[in-house]
Amino acid sequence: MKRVLVLVIVCFLAITTFGQKKEKSIKNLDFENVKNGKAVYWQSFGADNYILKIDSAISQNGKHSALIEFNGDSPSFKAWSYNIPAIYQGKTIKLTGYIKTENVTDGYAGIWMQIEPSIGFDNMSNRGLKGTNDWAKYEIELDLNPSEAKEIQIGGLLVGKGKVWIDNFQITIDGKQLDSVPLKEISKAEKDTEFKDGSKINSIELNNKKIENLKTLGLIWGFLKYYHPSISDGNYNWDFELFRILPEILNCKNITERDEIITSWIKNLGDYKLARKDNEQTNDIKLKPDLDWITNSNLSKELISELQNISNSERKDKNYYIGFDKNSDNLYFKNEDPYSEMKYPDAGFRLLSLYRYWNIIQFYFPYKNLIEEDWKNVLTEFIPKFINAKNELEYKLTTLELIARVHDTHANIWGYDNTLNNYWGKKYSPLGIKFIENKAIVTDYLDQKLGKETGLIIGDNITKINSKLVTDIVKEKLKYTPASNYPTQLRNLSDNLLRTKDSIINIEFIRNNEIHNTTLKTFTTKEINIYSKYLKSDTCFKFINNEIAYLYLGSIKKSYLPEIFKKIKNTKGLVIDLRCYPSEVMAYCLSKYLMPQKTKFVKFSMCNIENAGLFTLTECFEVGEKNEDYYKGEVIILINETTQSQAEYTTMAFRVAPKATVIGSTTAGADGNTSPFYLPGSIETMISGIGVYYPDGTETQRVGIVPDIEIKPSIQGIKEGRDELMEKAIEIINVKGN
């Protein structure tokens, strides 16, 4: 839960703090300013099955407090949040607040504070309140690091069941109230606000010449963003510099004039030192910067010379737009304003969105070599698509289509997006669908009562939806369904098949070779829990029989492992189910029980801030430790298309155990930590930020974890309620274990 909460807070922070008015005074930390039943300046995020309200009957100070109350079947978390602009000087920042709880179980209550990017975070997860507690004061203190801090957020939260009240928050820096804390110096880029309300370019009339010129501008704009020292230092708001030169490029008469405009533009950016040497060619290079276009794009000699000089300029290991997480060495993107007020950005900002995304992939996507098409041609293709998007929906669908072209399951439009939710539909059938044998099969019910009332049973094959063939729907929607590979696209698309704006869906389905038609009622997310299929009620540990044990990593805890391995020590087989996302990071701690010694299992590729586009391979990392008492039975690891990211990484760790066998089907093919960023119009997205490879350099992205034995569920097995992967695991253990 802590990992999930951190991710949600990180994503929420970036969307809510950009563009915030930078005032010294912080108001309504005591919840006394209430309008229409809501606390002014406060926001919330988390699961829907919680009640948030301002309580006028209970308070620690004044007339009001803020309440979070669980109200549902499956506990998760909910949080109040408040944004504080990161504009202050100082060493440490302290949050104090009062908390009262009632019957908190299956989790904890607390206050929290986060400073981004990856500077500090504390949500009281190691000392949170449980049960019933009267009002008491609690504190969180973090290092501020003002030169790097971009976002600060505070709040209160409830993880699990029960009630929590929060009240009377205060913020101090180095013991001083914020009104008396000096402000930090902001960069020249932050001072530039000319185009904050629009690019002043509302439409662009395109022809082939203009598209080619805009492609050239996009290539050079992105190259300068990551290579020119003045831009790296934050001396320019590079978004707004685009809008300053764009009219000139659109109005230029020929290529010669275009290149003269761009050359003059570059020269005015400032001087730089030509002190870089050619990069030494070493064996640990995974990807080289793609800069051949500089000499292959029919640019003028003077412009080519200018760009080549910049590529060899002396640069620092810091960039205004790029950084590294101090805890994980993961890439993060900074100072990428989401322009939250622009739900449908103008033509200039839509072009900026394309340029921003395209160049992040061009220079900082570790798997760019696996895109399987010339990425520069994609830029050309999408220039008219972005510029001609007629409304917010077209703009966001075009963005989804672009994202899908990088083939990364981590990459999508994340968070709640009302426009896309309307497109897919906010009402759901109570049927759970999976593609089995390339057919849309009913595999479960999102709600048992409502599902059975549809008349459909497990194993039914849905062939038409509202008179449209499912195969045609798949063809139509795949381009808006980003994922690393086709099985994972089908996994994601299956969740959207029976969504609609209407109260009913008409379907055709096949049962026992007979065609049937029926009408399904649909329901809102308040009426059915669309995530119920992910809530596995089975235990994290059990014995299948006296000789075979089973671990489900979706709910296991590290603290359970010592006792579990005492109990299974003499069994002949262990099944580890990774058809889920691990509840905790298990790759290293569980491997200690499976291996007799340290064993290499993975290497990474890392980007380079000074030389954008360069990725180098690390040394191999190891799991396990010297352990003569390691588990000596067969180890069978179950995987499928739901095995993603950390689950794939964990599979890589376990499969190097002496008696390990991986069985199942293609995994999601999206390994490596994620790097989130925003596009204009508050579009929240991310990419895999680190490349992950086997010790011999074999890829994991897109191909996923290749099983030793491929086993897929069959329609007949679904009808019979069988777990065919589990059956195969037991068979292997019985054969090998004898």
Image (tube, rainbow, N blue to C red):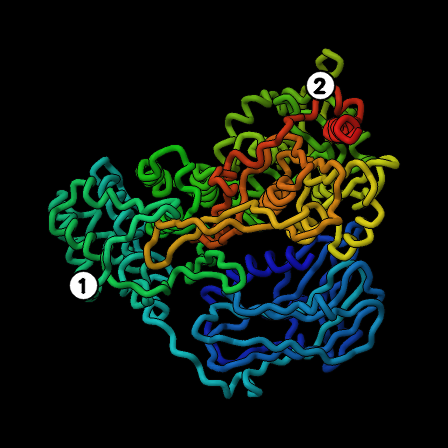
Residue at the spot x=67%, y=75% of the render? 31
Assign a secondary structure to mark 1. loop
Report crowding for label 1: few under 14, some 14 to 19, many 20 or more residues within 10 A (C-alpha): few
Q: Left or right of 556: which side holds 90? A: left
Question: Looking at this rendering, what residue extends furthest in the right direction?
Answer: 546
Mark carried by residue 268: 1
Residue at the spot x=65%, y=43% of the render? 654
Residue at the spot x=85%, y=65% of the render? 103
**From where the camera sits, is residue 578 visible?**
yes
Q: How many marks?
A: 2
Assign a secondary structure to mark 2. strand
Q: Left or right of 400: which side holds 641? A: right
Foreground disc of the pair 2, 1: 1
Q: Please provide percent x and percent y for residue 651.
A: 63, 41
Residue situated in front as seen by the camera: 604 or 469: 604
Dividing the image into 4 quarters, which one contains the C terminus? Answer: top right
Q: Amino acid at mark 1?
A: Asn
Distance from disc 2 to disc 1, alpha carbons, whole Å, reads 68 Å
Residue 723, by quadrant, is: top right
Q: Please provide percent x and percent y for residue 569.
A: 81, 45
Mark carried by residue 517: 2
Report crowding for label 2: few under 14, some 14 to 19, many 20 or more residues within 10 A (C-alpha): some
